[in-house]
Each structure stands twice: as C-alpha cells, then as structure tokens.
Amino acid sequence: MVMSQDQNAGQSHSIKIDDNSFERVEEFKYLGTALTNQNSIQEEIKNGLNSANACYHSVQNVLFSSLLLSKNLKIKIYRTIILPVDLYGCETWSLTLREEPRLRVFENRVLRRIFGTKRDEVIGEWRKLRNEERNDLYCSSSIVRVIKSRRMRWAGHVARMGEGRVVCRVLVGKPEGKKPLGRPRRRWEDNIKMDLQEVGVWTGSSWLRIGALVIAVMNLQVP
C-alpha cells in the first residue's frame, strides 16, 4: 500500500519477494485496525461503528429489552461489551467535528433503548427522551469524552518514553517534502493540544515537555 494524497501514486508499483508478488491495495487491516492509502481515520471509525452496531443488535432483544435487568446493569453491559468494540484503538484517533456527531448518535440510540420512553404529564402520552433528559439519567462520561481521556493517557505514555523509543521518534519526526495546498488536516497532536486546553493544562509549550502532567489530567475520571 502506497500512502499518498495523490490518488494515482503507486498504481503501477508492486513488491516482489522471491517468487511472490504483492499487489498494491487501497486499504487493509493490521491488528484489527483499518489502514488506508489516504491515511484517513474515517474508515476506521466506520468499521468500529459497524462492529459496535452488530454487537448492540445481538443483545438488544435479549438483554436491553428484559424487565428483569435494572437500567444500571444495562449501562454496565453497554460500557463493558459494546463500547470497547467501538473504541478499539481510539487512542490513535484524530477526531474532527464530522466524526464526533456520528459517535454521539450511536451512543444516544443505545441509551434511549436502555432508558426507554417517558410519559409526558401534559399530553398524557409516552414519548422518546430528549438529549437533555438522557444526559441527566446517564451519569457516566460520554463516548467522545472517553476517547479524549484514553488519547491523553496514551500521550502521557509516549511523552515518558523518550526520543530513544521508536514510537516517540515516529511521532515527533518531520516528513520530507512540501505540504499540499489548502487547509492541513487535523493531526493527532492537534487533538492532544485541544484536549489539554479543555482541561486548562496547555501552556503553549511542547506537549511532550509536560508529559508528566498529562496523566495528572486524568481528572476526567473515565476508564
């Protein structure tokens, strides 16, 4: 796979080892993570949502519809069975405002199924919960907040590794060549800086220098 913003890059290239020839592909999975030649995270998030949806539909009629299970137990089932399927590898995600609503929509659908409907005292009919009412009932951290916490936790590990480790060298390395025209993509490092600003830790210096503080920022209190 040739990773380039040029759609035609490497179309005629192939790798031949001994008598084996490996053709060029646009995407493939490695250790459960979807890698694309455009270095886009959208396909990975899409695959995670599809897998989480399949997991949700496999238990909704048996567990989430059961009157024998409390709502708290159903929430634990969601957070221990369904959520990890969706957020596999989320520590490396670089989210934009386009991906965050997709994740929230999925979580809202699951939580509405768990909490059920509410009787409107004015009109006397049952209706779906509004987002504000659902947030009041759901005391745990939202799916986007969980991603931010896990991403900062991984950033703290990388910061403490030091420049001698391959992971740190890959992260801080500067690729050669010219940047393409137009607005650059939001990088993983940009997300880390925004997360640190959100919790009031970012001071404008390199986030690697405050790696010890990244773990201290875990006042988000999410797993």
Image: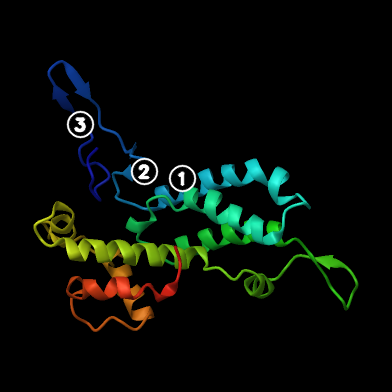
**Percent x, y for residue 92?**
32, 56
Q: Which mark is residue 211?
A: none
Determine whether 48 is above or below 173 in the image: above
Q: Are marks 2 and 1 in contact (CB under 8 Å)?
A: yes
Name the foreground residue: 38 vs 107: 107
Mark 2 — residue?
34
The mark nearer the N terminus, 2 or 1, is: 2
Mark 3 — residue?
12
Q: For this view, does 16 lie left or right of residue 68?
A: left
Q: CA distance from mark 2 to mark 1?
A: 8 Å
Mark 1 — residue?
47
As helix, strand or loop, the secondary structure at mark 2 comes to strand
Q: Are marks 3 and 1 in contact (CB under 8 Å)?
A: no
The residue type indicated by label 2 comes to Ala
The residue type indicated by label 3 comes to Ser
**Image quadrant assignment for residue 115:** bottom right
Determine whether 10 is above or below 159 in the image: above
**Percent x, y for residue 103?**
51, 59
